Image (tube, grey):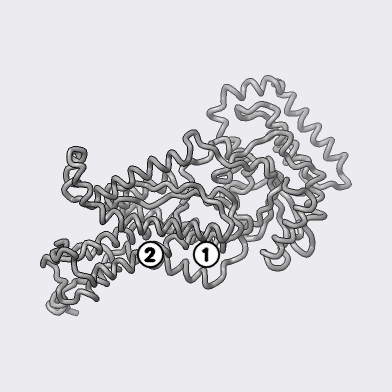
Amino acid sequence: MTSLLLPPPQAAAAAYGCCHCLLLASTTVPARSGCVGRASRITLALRCLPITGHRLRSRKVACQATTETEPEGNGDEEKKDETTNAEAALLSSGDTVQDMDADATSTNGIQENVEVIEVASGSPLPGMKQQLDDSVRIPKATIDILKDQVFGFDTFFVTSQEPYEGGVLFKGNLRGKPAKSYEKITSRLQNKFGDEYKLFLLINPEDEKPVAVVIPKQTLQPETTAVPEWFAAAAFGLVTIFTLLLRNVPVLQENLLSTFDNLELLKDGLSGALVTGLIIGVHEIGHILAARESGIKLGVPYFVPSWQIGSFGGITRIVNIVRNREDLLKLAAAGPLAGFSLGFVLLLLGFVLPPSDGLGLVIDPTVFHESFLVGGLAKLLLGDVLKEGTQLSINPLVLWAWAGLLINAINSIPAGELDGGRIALAMWGRKVSSRISSLAIGLLGVAALFNDVAFYWVVLIFFLQRGPIAPLSEEITDPENSYIGIGAAILLFGLLVCLPYPFPFDPSQLTDMDFNF
């Protein structure tokens, strides 16, 4: 999981606006490239007007970035005349440029949405700031070098381009394997311009064809927060420790107001908090190890407290751009894989080992119907002892490990920027994963009507983890089949933990049923 802080609204109109149509299936139509006719030029001139609260200089820069990237041709003089006529028609309406600049400030609230649609068409790169001025726009000479010397017949043959504020989107035909082509293009880009520009090789969701996006690197800056990251993480961590202890003391859960008068009772929940916390910690360690192997930089994890199960796990920001889908899959799958493995082993030990005090924890066996995995293991390992309506004494390790498995399973839901959402994007691409995410959030919303945990998780996803997931440097190459198998196994295992066990534990209840056909 990633950033707790979403980018500011003005970032949506910034340099990375060109990538929104590649992040989500946008309904806006991108500007056409190539030779621009009279009507299109009037539209471009209109887009140069200060329609929002930004100063005229910023809009003028956007216009320059738009018009200077048009390909040259024999009709250059004719196009210049058309542009002059269009601008004259606009200025003849009676408003000077200065008057429009002043009027734009008074209508900032309404016109802000217009700029998002016309210029950026959506969300910028999550966790990045965007800035616009004369120093960051891509000159026409640079774009010509990109087309003629950086791209080529052996990598990506450019057929058209679409200028956007701060960056350029190139359409064309991809040659050879995407990963190899990306390496060649990046190497040439580095040789020509050093570290000045960043290349993205993505899939256009409108036609499922490859596109290349070049962005000035100085427009991509790490997002800063008002509160130091370590301070916020420490505060969340302390609250999570408290909720983990509280969850394992039923007496205090029944009367929260008496908690601070009976703090000594919290030590009774220490064992359960340690087991569940260990599973959560192993989950995060899995992410850290995978990130180091793939060269991914992670922020400080925020552990989210929960009154129901002790914690919802950790939220960890990715602070740099991930190289490809396979690296994202390795990172996202490593945490649940480690957490599920440890939790499953501890669950088996809980069913096999007798309680340490000889008494254990007395429960109603119907509680095992809440999980297909736990209910199936209980039926397999406990056998005829497990009957509805008959009290059962178990090792409390079962419930502690079960809580850890549930936390990992919730994080494996293929929605938003959860681990499951990242796994889905890495396995199936952005378009399919977006549909799966919408379906998963919808099902969670229905479940929230009947379950408190689902309700709080929907709220958490909506405010902190809804995405979109930041674009990867190269999103076209599929991961290896072995990693896809691991990702699918994690999604399936999480589903088994969350789904209920529908069958009765007592076989006599099945034999007594009278089926009349």
Give the vertical position of 122 relative to 403 (above or below). above
Q: Which mark is residue 427?
A: 1
Element marked by disc 1 = helix
Within-10-Å neighbours for mark 1: few <14, some 14–19, many 20+:
many
Judged left or right of residue 280, residue 430 is: right
Give the residue at mark 2: 340
Give the vertical position of 43 relative to 390 (above or below). above
The residue closer to the viewer here, 376 or 414, is: 376
- Could you tell me which quadrant the C terminus lies in? bottom left
Residue 17 image position (x, y, % from top left): 62, 43
Q: Is residue 122 visible?
A: no
Amino acid type of the residue that numbered disc 2 sits on in the rendered structure: Phe
Residue 271 image position (x, y, % from top left): 26, 56
The residue closer to the viewer here, 4 or 451, is: 4
Judged left or right of residue 490, residue 475 is: right
Q: Is residue 198 visible?
A: yes
